[in-house]
Amino acid sequence: MRELNENRRSVVRERAVLVEVITRADADLDGHRDRLEELGRLADTAGAEVVATMTQRRPSVHQGTYVGSGKVEELKALAESKRASVIIFDNNLTPAQVRNLEEAINIKTIDRSELIMDIFATRARTAEAKLQVELAQLEYTLPRLKQMWGHLSRMEGGGGLATRGPGETQLESDRRLARDRIQELKEKLRTIEARKEREVLARGGQLMVGLVGYTNAGKSSLLNALTGSSEYVEDKLFATLDTRTRVWRLPHGLKGLLSDTVGFIRDLPHNLVASFKATLEEAVHANLLLHVVDASTRHVQADMEAVDKVLAEIGCKDKPQLVVFNKIDLVDDPLRLDILSRARPDSVATSAKNGRGLEELTRVVTQRLAGEMRETVIRSAASDGRMLSWIQHHAIVLAQEVEDGQIVTRVRLPARLIAELPRVAKQAFTMTENP
């Protein structure tokens, strides 16, 4: 895998030409998004300097070079005039298209998926994230190895006179090494995934809320504002890749767990989604997802559709959602907020920066999670530590005393959690509702 940014500390930035090809189908599906603007932000995040852009509209893509022979010559001249060192396509290219473009233009050429994976590689901090990114990169690279070694073989494929040699030998060796490493990484990540799933399930009936959204929508800032934490925040795409979970103190003495997950983006490479399944475990098991949307962007609907697509891919399509229009401090036109709220009447508008709307968000989330509150008296054995711990974490304790060797606790708790008590109790207990 060729990285755009092998040395982040270097003062020399690669000079990039951005290319987008808009087919008739693309225009119908995504005509309301400024694709090159986002690609430019991705390039900047990866450490490249954008020196030129090129857009081509055509009925369908060219099978050999994606853009067609005429545009290839135009692209070559543009890259030479701007002294570009890399060409970045917003579209995803086949291995053959990358090879053909590089042979014609003589400049390193990468596509959107490779750029995103490069960013993930530079952003990975934990051992888990590094494993996930390495797996995604290897799975992306494996089918392209044949093209990488194509110049050392006179024919693609095996067998026949004058077709064997160092290229084919090295190709098969690289393939074998890549497959072995992929299997090793998958086994390590399966272990991590199983451990994380056990950790999540062990939380029992704790109220769990997951923050999901397009990258740079302000999820980490919301986590800090709602929980009082001080997690890393940066105005960059994919600033953080690891899930952070913090205690969120809700009204009426309730507590929930609020988890921030990796940000999504349009056409997020499937290999990355699959590799980060363990990281997204918090979203899969959440009671409620807060779909955080940057209200100041011009393409709100496109961002939301991209997030919904990834949520469907990880099995969260039908998970309860609450849309949170964040960054309203950056919205100058009040009419815009009115239009957004009318389009999604069940949404909440917030600003993690100045705190506007956070109280309303907390109220709505509490109502969604807790529902009807019930007053209940629970009589449990003094030795049943699991039951007593569960009560402290999930209920509002109104009074507690010892009576005939039992712990008598008067509580208020969400009605939906009452059914959890038999599963929690290690010893016999009694429960009286609305005494």
Image (cartoon, rainbow, N blue to C red):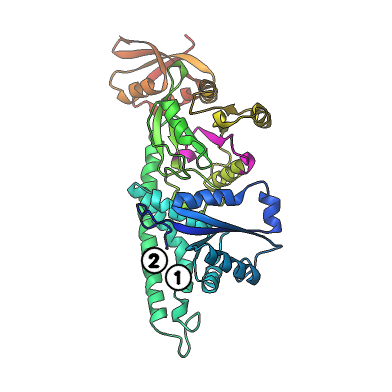
Rendering coords of residue 96 (x, y %): 54, 71
Q: Does the stretch in magenta take in 358? A: no
Q: Quick check: 16 left or right of 278?
A: right
Q: Is residue 181 above or below residue 156?
A: above
Asked whether residue 32 is in view, the answer is yes
Rendering coords of residue 403 (x, y %): 31, 9
Amino acid found under the numbered disc labelled 2: Ala
Rendering coords of residue 104 (x, y %): 55, 73
**Tag 1's secondary structure?**
helix
Q: Identify the image quadrant of residue 232.
A: top left
> Magenta region: which residues?
282-302
* Residue 145: assigned label: 1
Amino acid found under the numbered disc labelled 1: Leu
**Tag 2's secondary structure?**
helix
* Residue 178: assigned label: 2
Asked whether residue 114 is in view, the answer is no
User: Camera-side residue: 293 or 297?
Assistant: 297
User: Camera-side residue: 422 or 167?
Assistant: 167
> Residue drawn 40% across and 48% down?
123
Q: Identify the image quadrant of residue 133.
A: bottom left
Q: Quick check: 291 left or right of 422?
A: right
Residue that sits furthest to the front in the current view: 81
